[in-house]
Image (tube, rainbow, N blue to C red):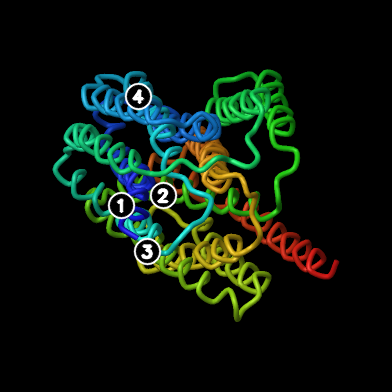
Amino acid sequence: MIRRVGASLPLAVVLLQVTAVAVLLPDVRLALGSSTSGGQWALNAYLLALAALLPACVTLRSRGLTVAGAVVWAAGAVACATADSSAALVAGQAAQGAGAAAVLAAAIGPESSIAGAVLPGLALAFGPLVGGIFAEENWWHVFFWAGVPLAAVAGLGALPTRRSEPTEALPPIRLLALAGGLAAITIAEVQSDVWATGWWALLLIAGVALLGRAVPDLRPSTLAWAALAGCLAALVFLVPEYLQLARNLSGLRSGTLLLTVTVPAVTVWAASILLAGGIPALLRGAAGAACAVIGLAALATIGAHTRYAVVILALGLAGTGLGLAAGAAASLPRPSWPGASHAAAFAGATLGLATAGAGFQFAQTDKRAAGGSFEEALAAGVGWGALVLMLLLVVAALLIWLGQRRSQLAQLR
């Protein structure tokens, strides 16, 4: 059990960084003079590098690659801590994501366990609070400096892990197609405001085609897992932007309020898995999607002065629903290749954040052009982002239904 807990350290550090940085981003944007897209890139660059490189690193994993990954991870943290521009911060975040992929690959095994999920669950649940504590004192530089020892801790946790040979290693052409597809779609979405429509559409189509070439045989449960991860990642990004920039809350209060999403998501996810034997995945998935859609529908209507009670209730419903649906998706059959679920989750987080962020940017620009205030534009952006996430949830619910249907048919044969 101790070995499994140690092996979970890399994933715990990754989730801690994602959730904490999301709360720090509003302060970072103000300090560096970043645009909305620049702030989004700071988080998307980390997720994109991690998602694009993780499958290749799982195939090539070795002790040498793990050590190199930890070094790159630490170097990226230094680049972020000393960044004096948005471009430098984005580059550092991308380096951290690349290094994290190499380290995390060494710790991925063919099976999951409750013991191995404790630390990542705690990091995901309380990461926003950690970010809020650093944001309260405007210590974002200090947080990134802390990434150096965190990279060392993650690397040391991954080194003792025994290597498990993948049963379905992806060929190099698919690995390249996966990385290229994720990059193309992310760039098209995040930069949608500056790309001409024709170039944006061409890049988006090319990205979808590459992803189709890379993973033509994904299971519905894996796709549902990716969609739900995308919803959670987008919420973790959008909520602090609204609370800190539109409502002028401190970083600590913003991070604390974000716990109404992450804590229910993690606890209900664990409970949903424990109930897998008694409640069908279809029922849990449908109930979770419905609960989250209600919460997101409320978020879609928020304004610059909406009552905090309404915002908190909406966030709590969204987090609870996501956790319930994620537990349903996790209980369905998944690919046997080690790292498939992790890669799907991070790929989904990358694309979900990019897509919801595109709606966030579009609505802000449109509202400001119509004469709306900065605060009204931010609220409108969150509303559009919530609408995008509602569509993702409907897709996830359908995929869970399809996954259970296939599982039942396979049992009858």
SS at mark 3 in the image: helix
Which part of the image, by quadrant, shows the C terminus? Answer: bottom right
Q: Position of residue 288 (x, y in %)?
A: 57, 68
- Give, as a three-letter code, the residue at label 2: Val
- Examine the rendering and report whether any part of residue 254 can be seen: no
Q: Residue at x 29, y 25 (%)?
A: 71
SS at mark 4 in the image: helix
Left or right: 184 as drawn, with respect to 258: right
Q: Which residue is mark 3?
A: 263
Q: Earlier in the sequence, mark 2 or mark 4?
A: 4
Q: Residue furthest left?
A: 137
SS at mark 1 in the image: helix
- Give, as a three-letter code, the residue at label 1: Pro
Q: Position of residue 223 (x, y in %)?
A: 65, 49
Q: Give the class, few, some or many, for how many residues have Cα within 10 Å of label 2's Cα (few <14, many ≥20).
A: many
Left or right: 306 as drawn, with respect to 255: right
- Give, as a three-letter code, the residue at label 3: Val
Q: Compared to 195, does 367 lie above or below? A: below
Which label is found at residue 68? 4
Q: CA distance from mark 2 to mark 1?
A: 8 Å
Q: Which residue is mark 1?
A: 128
Which label is found at residue 236? 2
Q: CA distance from mark 1 to mark 4?
A: 29 Å
- Tell me where residue 14 sits by quadrant: top left
- Give, as a three-letter code, the residue at label 4: Ala
Q: Earlier in the sequence, mark 1 or mark 4?
A: 4
Left or right: 397 as drawn, with respect to 299: right
Left or right: 222 as drawn, with respect to 55: right
Q: Position of residue 146 (x, y in %)?
A: 19, 36
- 2 and 1 marks in contact (CB < 8 Å): yes
